[in-house]
Image (cartoon, rainbow, N blue to C red):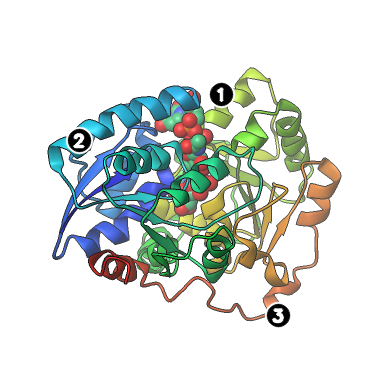
Amino acid sequence: MKIITIIGARPQFIKAAPFSFTFRKENEEILVHTGQHYDANMSDVFFKELGIPHPDYNLEVGSGSHGLQTGRMLEKIEDIILKEKPEGMLVYGDTNSTLAGALAASKLHVPVFHVEAGLRSYNKLMPEEQNRILTDHISNLLLCPTQTAVDNLNKEGITKGVLNTGDIMFDAVLRNLEISKGKYINGSWLNELKQDNSKIPNLKEKEYYLATIHRAENTDNHNKLREIFSAFEKFDKPVLLPIHPRTRKLIEELNIELNNVKLIKPVGYLLMLYLTANAYMVVTDSGGLQKESYFLKTPCTTLRDQTEWVETLENGWNMLSPIEVSTILEAVSRKLDCFKYPQPQLFGEGNAAEQITQAILNGGK
Ligand code: UD1
Ligand code: UDP
């Protein structure tokens, strides 16, 4: 079978690695990179570390407003579909690249396979929520990471072609955790951080917070962003923050002064896994990182009002916090009772790549 797969943003590279490896054993995949993320540490590093096949096309769309970015992708993806004549179009997650790929294919009557279908935060102001709802409603195969996602789709009347395959990000963690440990044990993780920022102190495992902030809902609102960084400055341990270029620009523009926060460039996936597994707590607005914290049994505080990954909230492994200094401080200083509770296998068994491949080959039966 011949399909086109669209990737473009950091989490999609990570999801593509296990799937491409599995699907390509007996099938043909044309990989299209939209160029939504393009800095070496937002893109190339993942291809190198995870052995993701070199993209067949790079659309080099780059940054821009939602309409401009999505429109440019749509036009270029259409040309590739007409040329390559695939039997299906696979898209991941909820970015502008996801929607562009799904829409271009659907208009040309090419079946759309959506990996990470069915997630809902029920906040339609989020660009991600808009992208996921629209993509789900034009998809032929809805490959859900959890039972909650299946139920969400059923509630919207989508029942055909819906399958719970487990979470492809769980596959990625299981495949790379030992490699990450092997690479970063014996303090080489700290050396790598210090090479980037010589002011990084001698951190020890479990004695730092790992934070990431990039979502539009937090960065577009400058008051919220200031509130988040004021809270970080009051944490009882240093905050290590691999910073998304979008947030770095804003910190500079807004002259936000940082002492307890230690900024570093975005890091590769293997170092990120090590830092997540060994943090005292993760504090983030990322979707993927909430789950990785859960898989790696590191408590998480999510700086958002809703999460689509509701399973992670059970037993306090993850906690939502509205964006106010006092509530953030309260959430991070909570008693970590979560360690008393075993985690149910709510994200599958780490074989989502095989399940997705089979589902595509069976045409959703
Ligand atoms: C996008 C996704 C978001 C996802 C995130 C993963 C959408 C609407 N949002 O958000 O769901 O969580 O990717 O990281 O698709 N920039 C650079 N270099 C890069 C990439 C971006 O400097 O390589 C800067 C540009 O100033 C750009 C800004 O970051 O305008 C935002 O990038 P964009 O891809 O539009 O959105 P993300 O915030 O990355
Ligand atoms: N990640 C990474 N390096 C970083 C920050 C994040 O490898 O410096 C990984 C992280 O481990 C997760 C994915 O990127 O696998 C999440 O991407 P992001 O937070 O950008 O997007 P989201 O999941 O919110 O869509």
Determine whether, in the image, residue 75 is placed left or right of residue 259. Answer: left
Determine whether, in the image, residue 139 is placed left or right of residue 214. Answer: left
Three-letter code, disc 1: Lys
Question: Does mark 1 have its CB less than 8 Å from ligand 1?
Answer: yes
**Where does label 2 land, which residue?**
80
Is residue 191 at least partly visible in the picture?
Answer: no
Question: Mark 3 or 2 closer to N-term?
Answer: 2
Report, in whole angstroms, how far the alpha carbon at label 1 lies from the one at label 2. 34 Å
Q: In which quarter of the image is the N terminus?
A: bottom left
Three-letter code, disc 3: Lys
Question: Does mark 3 have its CB less than 8 Å from ligand 2?
Answer: no
Disc sitting over residue 340 in the figure: 3
Q: Residue at x 60, y 58 (%)?
A: 279
Q: Where is residue 337 in the image (x, y as percent from the top left)?
A: 75, 73
**Where does label 1 land, which residue?**
249
Q: Contact, CB < 8 Å: mark 3 with mark 2?
A: no
What secondary structure is marked by label 3?
helix
| 18 or 133, nearer to the observer | 133
Question: Mark 3 or 1 closer to N-term?
Answer: 1
Q: Is residue 25 above or below residue 346?
A: above
| 72 or 58, nearer to the observer | 72
